[in-house]
Image: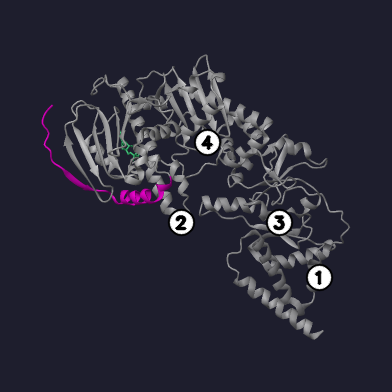
Amino acid sequence: MEHVENRVQEFEFVAEIKQLLDIIINSLYTHPEIFIRELISNSSDALHKIRFKRLTEPNILNPELELRIDITVDPETKLFKIEDTGIGMTKEEVISQIGTIAHSGTANFLKNLKKDSENFDINLIGKFGVGFYSVFMVTDEVTLETRSYIPDSSGVRWKSNGKEKYSIEEIDRPTRGTLIYFTLKDEYKEFAQPERVKEIIRKYSNFVDFPIYVNNEKVNTIDAIWRKKKDEVSREDIENFYKYLTGDDNPPLSYLHFSVEGNVNFNALLFIPDSPPSYYWRDFFDKTISLYSHKVFIQDDNPEILPEYLRFIRGVLDTDDLPLNISRETIQNSPLITKIKQILTNKILSHLEELAENEKEKYAKFTQNFGQIFKGGITIDSANRDRIINLLRYQSTTLPENEYTSLKDYVSRMKENQKSIYYVITDSRSSLSRNPNLEYFLKNNYEVLVMTDPIDSLIVPLIREYDGKPLKSIDKVDVEIQKETDGNERLDPETANKLFERMKSVLGDRVLNVQVSNRLVDSPVTLVAPYFGHDPQSEKIFKILDKNYQKSKKILEVNTAHPIIKNLAKLIDNSESDNIVEKIIEQLYYETLVLEGELEEPTELVKNMNEILQKFTELIGKS
Ligand code: ADP
């Protein structure tokens, strides 16, 4: 080996790293043991990489080395050492990988933390790859020695106290791979006990697919449990594997374990998580299924393996049909992956159909947690459109909160004279009580689907109809409403029209039209969207998506059986009350805006109301 100049260089950490180090040291103290998981995970990644390189590149350093992870601890000296025969790092790589935040997990973590540092749930930290830096929880100084797989690379030593600076020097290192060592702080000396370390490995890293040795004793199982027959694996093994794979502490909501033989051959073990996707999770929608070929890990971020709307699925897929020495790019576009995607989609949809039929509570949970993402399938998977629509579940005005109905069940409950499926889009169940447009439906016991996901505004127009029945928003003018026969006396049409003309002239182009309402019971007026317009909740979403979105003008509907309206009609011929009539019409209009949450500026409303109150108090004083 050629002699290398032993020159120590000092570097400063980039600013984010300093910040990250502080956060880690101050907040991870409740789970100090995760540093072991993080170090093992890095070693395992490095071993996956070299296993792949060994198959695809002719020239690598020490091709014969066994792929393994060795941990050595000494309770006397509190020394902790971990060494792998993985891909190693060049000097440049050490500087760029360990001294900066180049990788997505940590960068996202910091971004979220900055956005919302007060409400940040520290327990989520475990779900992130906080990575290498977590060692600074348990020690004051870390040394890393590494040598890249590139044949003429030289060894590098990196050393830091995790505060401001780190140093780097070239060293003689005979073999490929990475060694990390440090002395544990006194309060963490438990991690120098071999038994404690083994226990932690069994908990967090049991399924790492390289052997892990602690003081020369092999600890983990290295089972490809997805390759086993269904009845050979216990539920407990499956759940432990899920925890290992995802870092999620809850057992999965449900899983599918199957193998496919024929044109395409593979084994798969797939999970639906129990928890809603936390956007803090590392790469939640990018890393879905770990793809293995001949038991060798290939990649876990292939965007082609699942359609976007199923990317809440986690799991492993192992196929012998992919040649091992295939490049990442070729896998991305391979016809085999397209075929696998089709089969997976089909299997997952069948599984969801089964859940929906037989495990209603679980399916309700699925709808709550992943319904939003899943619905998006209607926009992209036209081949499975009908299956997806049948799998949709909605709340409804006749069901208790958080119970869901399918469109099919809704239709089976429709009233005899009912032609459409009624729905309302709202931001929450509780704001429904403010919507006067629901009055008719509630009073006459028509069931209305309650849609609360922002994406519903985009999805419903695509569903259009179910079982020949159109979906109609109760906030729009064209929803069919049977004429009222409640015996309440209404204004005669002539008087009503005169009043409407007056209202139009007061409100001008703020409304599209003024017309009689059949949907109101207790309220005097309401706004409804015209035939080609959108309900208010959808308009809010469109406005968020497109700043220049122009809201459509609304139609003012008037309840001609309401006492205020009847009284108002009597006043309009009297020129003395001109001014107050105008104020009252304005006031009624403002109220509709308030109910829709559309009144940005209350000054006019208050001024108007005060003028009405002044008039009212004068009148009372006179009488
Ligand atoms: P992450 O694992 O989330 O990428 P880390 O801070 O743990 O973040 O590691 C940063 C990078 O350093 C890794 O992405 C990898 O490139 C490199 N690295 C860390 N540990 C090892 C190792 N044992 N062998 C080779 N490279 C490593």
Whole-angstrom CA distance, mark 4 to mark 2, is 28 Å
Whole-angstrom CA distance, mark 1 to mark 3, is 26 Å
Q: Earlier in the sequence, mark 1 or mark 3?
A: 3
Q: In which image quadrant can residue 146 be found?
A: top left
List x then y, in percent, for residue 429. Answer: 66, 51
Q: Earlier in the sequence, mark 4 or mark 2?
A: 2
| In the image, farthest residue toward the right | 487
Q: Secondary structure at mark 4?
A: loop
Which quadrant is home to the N terminus?
top left
Report the residue marked by disc 3.
Answer: 433
Q: Earlier in the sequence, mark 2 or mark 3?
A: 2
The three-letter code of the residue at mark 2 reads: Glu
The three-letter code of the residue at mark 4 reads: Phe
In the rendered image, the vertical position of residue 255 relative to residue 447, given as above or below: above
Report the residue marked by disc 2.
Answer: 118
Between circles 1 and 3, the one closer to the viewer is: 3
Between circles 1 and 2, the one closer to the viewer is: 2
Between circles 4 and 2, the one closer to the viewer is: 2
Give the colour scheme shown: one colour
